[in-house]
Image: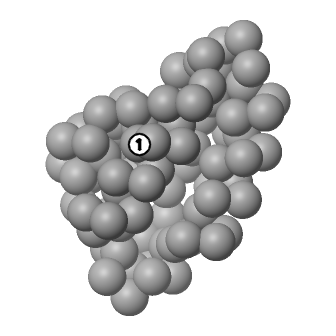
Amino acid sequence: MKEFTYNITDENGLHARPAGLLVKEAGKYNCSVTLKSGDKSADAKRIFAVMSLSVKCGDSVTVITEGADEDNAATSLKAFFEENL
């Protein structure tokens, strides 16, 4: 299991466009990808689950990868968050 925490800096938070891109990126990996924000968690491979977190600018999210290619997934997803959110 790998995990990292990221503070959202996009002024619109984790809205539809980056959420869709995140789901697409997470879907590339053969491992589970979970997002946690506050007391909620969601499967990062499901758009409605990601949107249900209602992540705003300034919120922090924890990304947890677990499975076959968790190392690659964690590295790529961290870069994704830094570039897009």
| Disc 1 secondary structure class | helix
Closest to the observer, 84 or 14: 84
Residue 34 visible in image = no
Q: Position of residue 25 (x, y in %)?
A: 54, 43
Residue located at (35% from left, 37% from top): 41
Residue located at (60% from left, 18% from top): 31
Question: Is 76 on the left-hand or right-hand side of 61?
Answer: right
Residue located at (42% from left, 70% from top): 59
Question: Is 83 on the left-hand or right-hand side of 8?
Answer: right
Q: Position of residue 74 (x, y in %)?
A: 71, 39
Looking at the image, is 68 positioned above or below residue 36?
above
Q: Position of residue 19 (x, y in %)?
A: 35, 56
Looking at the image, is 67 positioned above or below residue 81?
above
Which residue of the protein is positioned furthest toward the top in this rendering?
Answer: 68
- In which quadrant of the rendered image does the N terminus lie? top right
Type of the residue with mark 1: Val
Q: Quadrant of residue 55?
A: bottom left
Residue located at (69% from left, 54% from top): 78
Q: How many marks?
A: 1
Looking at the image, is 39 positioned above or below residue 11?
above
Which color mode does the image show?
Answer: one colour
Q: Position of residue 44 (x, y in %)?
A: 41, 37
Q: Quadrant of residue 18?
A: bottom left
- Residue under pointer 1: 23
Residue 32 visible in image = yes
Mark 1 neighbour density, 10 Å: few (under 14) some (14–19) many (20 or more) = some
Closest to the observer, 34 or 24: 24
